[in-house]
Image: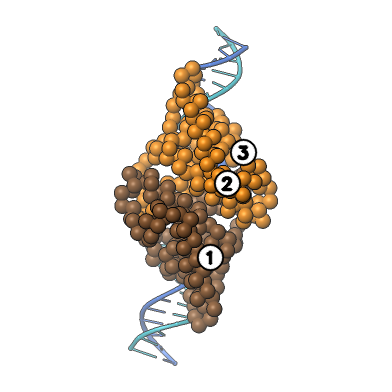
Chain colours: A orange, B brown, C cyan, D blue
Amino acid sequence: METKFRCNCPFTSALDILGDKWMLVIVKQILMENKQTFKDFTESDEGIATNILTTKLKQLEAFGIITKTKLPNNNKSNIYLLTEKGLAMTPIIVELGIWSDNHLRDFNPTIVNKGGIELLRRDKAEFTRVIEQQYREKLATTKN
Amino acid sequence: METKFRCNCPFTSALDILGDKWMLVIVKQILMENKQTFKDFTESDEGIATNILTTKLKQLEAFGIITKTKLPNNNKSNIYLLTEKGLAMTPIIVELGIWSDNHLRDFNPTIVNKGGIELLRRDKAEFTRVIEQQYREKLATTKN
DNA sequence: TATATTACTTGCATAACACAAGCAAAATTA
DNA sequence: TAATTTTGCTTGTGTTATGCAAGTAATATA
């Protein structure tokens, strides 16, 4: 699974990895929708196919964005968690949400107002901080 | 060219439009690399194929992210410029650059340090402001 | 022990993208 | 003003990415 980078531009290089239909969506689901098992992802609103999910989870793991572990008491379910590198993608996702909130409702009027979108509008830095902190707390109670 | 949105999530809806290999790259080229004609894009480091470029420029125009015009003295070259909706994508691109700068050099050691990356590291809000202002100045001297 | 669940894999169809070539209109050059 | 070049595309063909349905092995549950 070697990734070919198109050029030496940092912006384009990020998109060589994240610029597809699923990578950022999966990270969002882990970060903001409490999803962590294979089954969780397959049951999401986005409806990813299982073969694509397998491929994308492997890619995310290969790039160090998520880790794949098992809980000590459960030998069956794999648990996918964000690494620090994955958590560092929060601002990207936040900015996508802001742009969507401001400019995409004409094209998709069904976009919902929930998940603390008022805070996102009022103070995006605080929104980002809260999301990251909540995930760190989840990590602390999950891993140990 | 109707876009099917996967669900009613604002983050996912943004990626229904921007989540591919080229949309954000083209916006970056317009915003930060002074590219504006069809030929400019074909000559870029990323090396987009002309048929893909045609498709993506049409999509960006359909979503109101860019406009297609001609200069008054030139009846041949089309000029592609960012709209306000397109300019509003600057923070997304900035965050992609920050993440890339911090976490992608292990995978692509050729990533360059230029284009004011020191400012990007020191003060991303200021970096964003400068980029947007420079583009607005370009717009002012181009359109009229 | 039988059944269900989870995390996949496999096969096949379609959509996105890549590469090469060609082409018409405008601009430039001779 | 005729010939050439440039620009902005289109077309044809192949490959990669994604979608959908089905199947499977290992584990968990009844």
Chain ID of residue with mark 1:
B
Q: Are marks 1 and 2 on the same chain?
A: yes
C-alpha span from label 1 to label 2: 22 Å
Chain ID of residue with mark 3:
A
Residue B70 in view: no
Residue drawn at (61%, 50%), measured in percent from left and top?
A121
C-alpha span from label 2 to label 3: 12 Å
* Callout 1 amino acid: Leu
- Rate crowding at label 2 as few (under 14), some (14 to 19) or many (20 or more) other CA atoms within 10 Å: many
Residue B119 in view: yes
Mark toward the viewer: 3 or 1: 1
Residue, disc 2: B11
- Contact between marks 3 and 1 (CB within 8 A): the answer is no
* Callout 3 amino acid: Asp
Q: Could you tell which of marks 1 and 2 lies nearer the N-terminus?
A: 2
* Callout 2 amino acid: Phe
Residue, disc 1: B82
